[in-house]
């Protein structure tokens, strides 16, 4: 499961708005996906890291899905 809470915290700390992300080339549908913890591409993660001058850990938290075994 993907959780983008670190992204919103990083954006707030660096005073970056979603409007700035759009101006820097992040598509509105991608922002929607981020807001709803949906998948985004590695290229998008790289762009966000560049825009925010941070590492991927400041963008996304990945929690493995629980796999049930029989």
Image: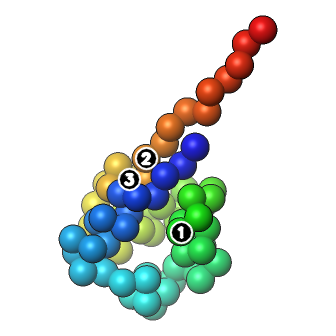
Q: Is residue 41 visible?
A: no
Q: On the picture, is 52 further left or further right than 22?
A: left
Residue at the extreme top: 70
Q: In the figure, 23 relative to 40: above or below?
A: below
For marks 1 and 2, give the CA distance: 13 Å
Tell me the element at label 1.
Answer: helix
Residue under label 3, please give it.
56
Q: Residue at x 40, y 58 (%)?
A: 5
Residue under label 2, please give it.
61
Pointer 1 or 3: first along the chain: 1
Tell me the element at label 2.
Answer: strand
Mark 1 is surrounded, within 10 Å at the Cα level, by few (under 14), some (14 to 19) or many (20 or more) other residues, namely: some
Mark 3 is surrounded, within 10 Å at the Cα level, by few (under 14), some (14 to 19) or many (20 or more) other residues, namely: some
Quadrant in which residue 67 is drawn: top right
Q: On the picture, is 18 further left or further right than 65?
A: left
- Quadrant where the N terminus lies? top right
Q: Residue at x 55, y 75 (%)?
A: 31
Q: In the figure, 8 relative to 57: above or below?
A: below
For marks 2 and 3, give the CA distance: 9 Å
- Number of disc labels: 3
Q: In the figure, 11 relative to 65: above or below?
A: below
Which of these two is toward me, 35 or 54?
Answer: 35
Q: Is residue 54 visible?
A: yes
- Mark 1 and mark 2 in contact? Answer it, CB < 8 Å: no
Pointer 1 or 2: first along the chain: 1
For marks 1 and 3, give the CA distance: 16 Å
- Residue 18 placement (x, y as % from top left): 43, 83
Mark 2 is surrounded, within 10 Å at the Cα level, by few (under 14), some (14 to 19) or many (20 or more) other residues, namely: some
- Quadrant where the C terminus lies? top right
Residue at the extreme left: 13
Q: Residue at x 43, y 89 (%)?
A: 19
Residue under label 1, please give it.
35
């Amino acid at each position: 499961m993907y959780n983008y809470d670190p992204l919103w915290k990083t954006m707030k700390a660096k005073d970056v708005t979603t409007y700035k992300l759009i101006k820097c080339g992040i598509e509105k549908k991608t922002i929607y996906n981020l807001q709803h913890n949906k998948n985004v591409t590695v290229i998008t993660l790289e762009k966000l890291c560049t825009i925010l001058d941070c590492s991927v850990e400041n963008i996304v938290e990945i929690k493995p899905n629980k796999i049930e075994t029989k």
